[in-house]
Amino acid sequence: MSLENRVTEIIVNKLGVKAEEVTPEAHFVTDLGADSLDQVELMMDFEDAFDLKISDEEAGKLQTVGAVIDFLKAKGISV
Amino acid sequence: MNNRQAYIVGTGHFVPSRILTNADLERMVDTSDEWITTRSGIKERHISEPSQATSDLSIEAARNAMDAAGWKPEDVQAVIVGTVTPDFVFPCTAAIIANSLGMPNIPCYDFEAGCTGFVYGLIQARALIVSETVDRILVIGGETLTRITNWKDRSSCVLFGDGAGAVAVSSQGPGGLLGGWHWGADGSFGSLLCQKAGGTREPLTHEGLDEGRNTIYMEGGEIFKNAVRAMRDSALFALEKEGITRADVDLLISHQANVRIIDATARALGLPSEKVFVNINKFGNTSSASIPIALDEVVRGGLVKPGMNIVLAAFGAGLTWGGMVLRWK
């Protein structure tokens, strides 16, 4: 499974959205209907899935699906 | 090693009669019932009158627990209180309570472990009973958090409420056997949830009062993450110490800080919602009082049957955390 697909799967499970809505440009709040606590829980799911720490400061910048994928790639995560 | 055990033999709680609803808050700050409900699960909370301090709520909760246990004042050999809102920095709230209840000369002390206070108290009570230091002890979690709430902070002022819960703990059952436990703290996260001014680090000044530095400060997102993981781990370690697994859990009573934290903790533990007790909708976050209030509601509501395993999990300022298994006999 690609990194993109894994991230999409996590977002679909947490937010109950359709996979096709989870585009790189999709904004968690305005496009996918997340509130602030959904975002915290998403970051926790990413931390658990990819075994890394995401600080609050970093999390604040991760407002779109693409930003999360870029962030994970920059951390050296491929799957 | 002796075979002494500690049992909860009576529970009680008390909340002030005045209720502040989400609709009331809509008239005080820029918020809405929908915003508060979806982010916290809270619909209303009880607020102390100016004349009601933490001891006043705790005395009533203690009376109810003693009545349930069939205890007279002379039966009580110690009173301990977990609170972040004591009547005074000193003397201790526990001594005020004991004095009002007619219990002279017994040991009394307060301890401060944030919202984990009550679980810390049960762990202490168990140790004091097993070590033959006392036979019967009152453990109380009591708070008047609305005294230190920042009513200008729309994101936090909606969360807190006042109340007290108490349990009578005895070396003689039957009742809720205090089983496996876990407790811990990490001071490196202390600044995430704190009352900045009013202690010796930053005595309260006129300016500090104007800025609300004597009120509750909280970084919600970071707290959320730590809360879920610490409560999950506390529950799991407590279960392991008791020699049972999550499949043996009949009911989770976690600290009632936010229904989203409770739900996430239950998911992390793999517990279905029917095994998770929630009353935050009625009381808000009452810190160390939340678990004993919930426990009393569960017991008086007839939800507790012999043979049941209840797991408690708490998390709070410090940061502190703790869990305990109660095996109802």
Image (cartoon, rainbow, N blue to C red):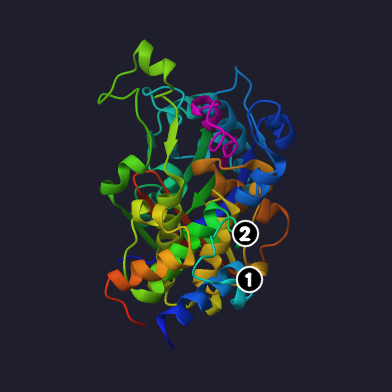
Considering depth in this image, is A60 or B320 the residue closer to the camera? A60
Query: Are the two marked residues, 1 and 2, in contact with CB atoms closer than 8 angstroms?
Result: yes
Q: Tag 2's secondary structure?
A: loop
Q: Residue, x 56% and y 46% (percent of image)? A: B290
In this rendering, is residue B255 above or below B289? below
Q: Is residue A47 visible?
A: yes
In this rendering, is residue B193 above or below B124? above
Considering depth in this image, is A10 or B317 the residue closer to the camera? A10
Q: Which residues are magenta?
A: B145-165
In this rendering, is residue B311 above or below B137? below
Q: Tag 1's secondary structure?
A: loop
Amino acid type, mark 1: Val
Q: Residue, x 36% and y 83% (percent of image)? A: A79
Q: Quadrant of residue B19?
A: top right
Q: What residue would you read off at disc 2? A: A33
- Residue B135 relative to residue B8: left or right: left
Considering depth in this image, is B87 or B133 the residue closer to the camera? B87
Q: Residue, x 39% and y 43% (percent of image)? A: B317
Disc assigned to residue A17:
1
Q: Is residue B147 magenta?
A: yes
Amino acid type, mark 2: Gly
Where is residue B239 drawn, in percent x and y? 44, 71
**Which quadrant would the C terminus of chain B be assigned to in this image?**
bottom right
Where is residue B139 drawn, in percent x and y? 48, 44
> Disc 1 or 2, which lies upstream in sequence?
1
